[in-house]
Image (cartoon, helix red, strand yellow):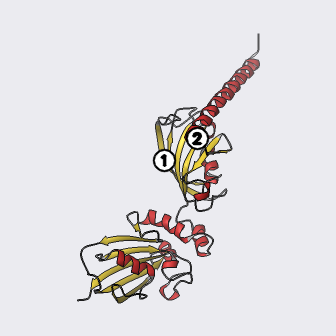
Amino acid sequence: MPNAEARAQSTRNRLRAFNAARFEQERHQVDSAAHVHAPQSRALPGGIWLILDGGEANVLGRAPDGGDRVQWKWVARTLKGDTLTSGEEDFLVEKDALPLCFHEVAKSTPRPGQGRFWTTSTTAFGASGIPGEIPPFTPLDVQFVQRRPVLDAAWLTEVQQGVFDEAVWLKEFVAEAAPAASQLADRPVWVDCVDCSPLTSEGEAMRLDIHTVDVQSILQGEQGRESTMEWRRGTPDQLVPALEQALLAHPRAAVLTIWTTSEFAFQHKGAPAAGVRPRTPVRFDVQVSPLW
């Protein structure tokens, strides 16, 4: 008769064999699902398949390294497409306690970026799953959006040093700070038209009360500079490009908030007299009054 230790060892051996067989089954299912839905997906460690929206060559930004912070919005589905759960995460890559698939995918995705991946339960939520949401031993099909937190001081420093694209940073910032703002054509200028009641006609003169504040100051507590000027609609080279374009695009606006990169404001040198640092995106708060 086998002793207790021998029986325990036999149980462990059967469990390992069972887990190995389950993993091989899951891996086959994940491989098949990824290749059916995204033949161009690429393999990551742990049996993960990833495809980025827009393709590898059409994404902007740098993928994070270990220790960098990212923000995620994600939706997890079964391999058959049934929605299981969703979530939002703010985590340090390779540091925080999240499934391995989050960290591996994060390191292979730029910020901002988005895509879809398929993974076995081994690198997802494993034998425990998420009670009431994801059953144990469930391979997943996950859609996700990855961003870099806009309040990441290191990111803003990279922008001001010219290491990171201002427009990419500002787009993320505006999406969080002013989701109602709309972009002007393909320019790095966003406008939130607070009051668009009828105000002026083409060519009429107007008074502009302008509050100028750069993003660094916004993060530190809304400092800025107030100024007042008169402008006749259509007069060229009197306003910075972002202001002129926003006012022309919203001729009936009485109150506007305008977000823009330094290129469409005070150029890369900034405007020290207005408290605007070099290479720093700017917000203009504008109140428009007609001059009768």
Q: Is residue 71 visible?
A: no
Answer few, some or many: residues within 10 Å of disc 2's Cα (few below 14, many 20 plus, some between 14 and 19): many
Amino acid type, residue under disc 2 in the picture: Trp
Q: Is residue 151 above or below residue 266?
A: above
State the residue at coordinates (61%, 45%). Answer: 41
Tell which circle, 2 or 1, labels the residue nearer the N-terminal end: 1
Question: What secondary structure is marked by label 1?
Answer: strand
**Viewer-proximal residue among 168 and 287:** 168
Identified by mark 1, the residue type is Gly
Considering the numbered disc 2 on the image, is that residue within a helix, a strand or a loop?
strand
Q: In which quarter of the view is residue 162 placed?
A: bottom right
Locate residue 141, reporting x and y percent. Answer: 54, 40
Up/down of 105 relative to 14, above or below: below
* Quadrant assignment for the N terminus: top right
Q: Does residue 3 lie above or below 128 as drawn?
A: above
Q: Is residue 240 among the parts visible in the rendering?
A: yes
Q: Where is 128 relative to 277, above or below? A: above
Q: Nearer the viewer, residue 32 or 104?
A: 32
Structural distance between the alpha carbons of marks 2 and 1: 17 Å
Q: Position of residue 24 (x, y in %)?
A: 66, 30
Q: Is residue 26 left or right of residue 214?
A: right
The quadrant of the rendering that contains the C terminus is bottom left
Residue 190, quarter of picture = bottom left
Residue displayed at 53% across by 83% down: 270
Q: Which residue is mark 2?
A: 118
Q: Which residue is mark 1?
A: 87
| Quarter-of-image position of residue 65 | bottom right
